[in-house]
Amino acid sequence: MNTTANVISNELFAKWKPAAGAIGTIARKELLELLRDARFWWTSGIILVLMLIALILGWQQMQRVDTERATARAVTYQQWLDQGDKNPHRAAHFGQYAFKPVSPLAFIDPGIDQFVGSTVWVEAHKQNEFNFRPARDATSLQRFGELTMAFGLQNLVPLVIVLLAFSAFTGERERGTLRQLLSIGVKPSQLLIGKGLAIMAVIGALLLPVALLGFIALGFAGDQHASLANLVVRGAWMVLGYALYLTGFIALALGASAALSSSRQALIVLLTFWVVNGFVAPRAMTDLARMVSPTPTKVEFQNSINEARKATFGHDENHPAFAAFRDEVFKKYNVTRIEDLSVSFRGLSLRKDDENGYRIYDEHYGALWNTYARQEHIRAIAGFAFPLAVLRPFSMGMAGTDTFHQNQFATAAELYRRQIQTTMSEDLIQHHKNGDDLYVSNRDLWEKIPALEHKIPEANIAIAQQGLNLRILWVWMLAAIAFAVMATWRLRPL
Amino acid sequence: MHTQLYLKEIVNFEYRLFRADRLGLIIALILFAAASYAIINGQSWVNKQQQAIQAAHTEEQARLQKLKDNLGKINAGSLKSARASENPANAYWVGNRHAATYAILPPTAFAATAVGQSDLNPPYIKVSADNKESFALNEEIENPSNLLIGHFDLAFVVVFLLPLLLIALSYNLLSAEREQGTLAITLTNPVPLWVLIAGKLSFRAGLVFLLMVSITVAGLIVTGTDLSTMDSLIQLGWWIALLFAYILFWFALAIAVNVLAKSSAQNALILTGLWIVILLVLPTLINIVVNVAYPVSSRVAMVGLIRAAQTDATKESDAIVARFEQEHPEMTAGPVSNDDDTAASKKRVLVQQAAADRITQIMAGYDHQLARQQRIVDSLRFLSPAIVMQEALNAVAGTDNSRYQHLSRQVDVFHRNWQGFFLPKALENTPLTLADYEHFPHFSYVEQAISETTLRLFGGLLGLAVPIGLLYLFSVRRILNYPVTA
């Protein structure tokens, strides 16, 4: 008998001996068998190495991109401060560039980072879209995905589970040991729990170093984008989500092994499920979501905004709304000519036009982001059967690299833009004299606008967003366990 | 002579076995369902792109018509233009904003087979007389999660799902016969083992190949693709050749595993493992290694440099004052007159041109670095036949990066023509006439030279042929030691 196995069983499971009885014995035996299996060591070894590579390279990439963006942020703010003396509205036209910060958890799950623009021009009168998706500068190789920890956990570890568990019951049946076990009165449920515990222990041991490294790495992420508490809580939720997913997979694999009549069948069915879960269902659901709730094209989107803006007066003094506004101002300040106003009419009209614009942009961008949210919900429906459809958005949501977090930053950039507009308009309103063409402001005004600092939302906001996905994941896991339990009720010994 | 006879017999028996076995039917059904759905999906994507192109074209025509109408009214005296930026005769404003034209990249006939990069690269670029950076890199609107997950198109079915079906058909090519004991009996006939393998292989490969080709052709015709032009026939020919090479690769792999003389179950596991390595592990690993070892230079830094160039140009001459004055005439001294128009427009053109050289240099430097990184990735693609196949299918469908880069180069030339039409007029204060409006430069995409695409596609075929050759050599040597009895 293997000495190492003896030591392991004696030390680690000494507590189990008196208590769990049958289940404990089964679990220990399964564990020993797994630890003696060379194939297991090879596959898990390779996967562990791959995940460590993914962690290290992901960390490096994240740091590089973060540094680039931090530098760019400093440059654009300096350009804003150094723009010289000019009319405040010209300064508003000059604007700044806002660069999306990289979430400190992106090294675990980079999510949509490659497919979302990094830069947005914050300028007067317009809320722009983000430009420069990193994937556009890449080749079609990028579309295969990146080797990340999330990829390993979502696709490769379930594969290990399938390989470990597909012959759990069918193998015993084929070797003839199943009927011996059942004949001495072992309950199938005890077999199920024992085997399940052994596989969970093995997978847990495999992933433990990876998880520890991940949490340690979080400690090295600066607090520029998020507090350590925020990151740790998010990390903990991610661990929970992946634990639900992998436990459900173990239950599903054991259930399939119990329900089907041969190892070959079990392996084919489980691998088919793995392929459909990982590759077919996500794409099919995305196409379905696109059909039900289509994304508008840029031309459509711009057209509808332009149509809406026709009702605002902009810089057109012949526009009826401009005349209406002028009359309103006259009434408010009790004057009949622009020259008699105590404040700058230009400043007032700019502010009014901006506010009209804000309403339009809020409405249109809100509608666009609702379209995206609807597409996400449609995709999540598949999660009842194929859990990756809910696990992937959950993982991205907790890592801060999903569409919600992107939209949070877009909103922050837009609020920053409005802050600039309002400050510039206020300066005009207060200090510009009607009829003065040479009014300029200087660095003192530019310095009133602080640099844009965006922190990723707190963990509780992220978890509120992902509540539905997490619940569907729970339901799936419970259904998988129920399936496994029911499959063992009718366990055939022969 | 004997070989031919035996081959015929073997194929005959394989056909009978196929009819008796349910597995073949299931595989055929799965293939049919997946491929049909994929083609429908791909076609709806192409339709969406066509609609977007149509909407852009309509919008442009409406814009131009309005400009022409306004110009007619101004010429007749019934309308007076308030500001230079609204004046349809002002060459600067018309060229830079109002008449900006869409340079359109039309989807090819085969675009429904592979979405490729066409969801990232928009099918139109809005060209204006402004400097290139203001329009060249704009993005289409799409939910980033959709881009991350990808499309269920025919290329996905062929590259990812087809190998699984091929593995299911061929994992026990030899091992099943050996385990059943029939291999030894078959080989008591004077038929060489390789003929037996070739016969079994030809049947299965031929079946899958014919099935895929007929579903694809039928699907494309049903969804409205015009397959009668020379171009689309060439594309079809390449697609068929690539499909054949890919099927042959996976069968060659299966045979190589079979001749290792392991059990059927082990063969299945090994082949599935190889599928995972070739399709999942290798591409994702190469991707992240390349991103870390040869990172693309930062677009965000480029943005800062371009802005600095623009700022310097405006500081050097007063043109941003002019722009501002034109847009906010209430702030200028005196009413807007035609003279103010020209002075302002002239200054704007000059500032733009002053910044242009520096910006072109910055962008060219960036493009150069990008091209270098892409060349490295391109050469690394030969490590995995899946990457080679995906690239090749994208190239056939015309949805790869090289076609878009071809568009960009043509847009560069067109942009210079466009600027050459409008900017001199702005500098010389020549107002635009209605006759000018009929002679605006028009963009028309010219397809890549056949030789360029042929070279790329040939590279793809080679990237498949070399592994096939290596596997063949390996199998031919190992088969001499194959134990025909269990």
Image (spheres, coloured by chain):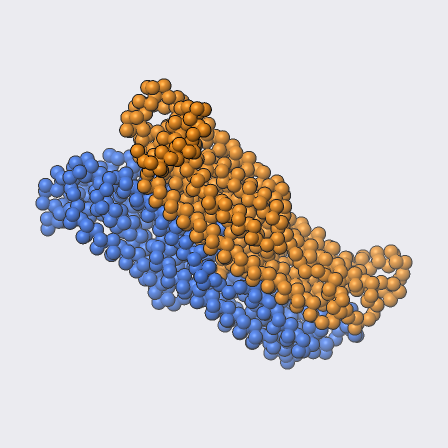
Chain colours: A orange, B blue
Mark yes or no: residue A16 visible. Answer: yes
Q: Residue at x 87, y 66 (%)?
A: A339
Does A269 sit left or right of B61 as displayed?
left
Query: Would you place residue A10 above or below residue B136 in this image?
Result: above
Query: Would you place residue B326 above or below residue A17 in this image?
Result: below
The picture places residue B318, in percent across and down from the top left corner, at 69, 76
- Residue B374 position by quadrant: bottom left
Query: Would you place residue B241 above or below residue B302 in this image?
Result: above
Front in this rendered view, residue B454 or B258: B258
Front in this rendered view, residue A274 or B411: A274
Q: Residue at x 83, y 63 (%)?
A: A430
Image quarter where the N terminus of chain A lies is top left
Front in this rendered view, residue A461 or A368: A461
Image quarter where the C terminus of chain A lies is top left
Q: Residue at x 64, y 54 (%)?
A: A454
Q: Residue at x 34, y 57 (%)?
A: B383
- Residue B184 position by quadrant: top left
Query: Would you place residue A251 above or below residue B149 in this image?
Result: above
The picture places residue A360, in percent across and down from the top left corner, at 69, 53
As drawn, the residue found furthest toward the right would be A334
Front in this rendered view, residue B347 or A71: A71
The picture places residue A289, in percent across and down from the top left corner, at 52, 44
As drawn, the residue found furthest toward the bottom would be B428
The picture places residue B171, in percent across and down from the top left corner, at 27, 42
Mark yes or no: residue B231 visible. Answer: no
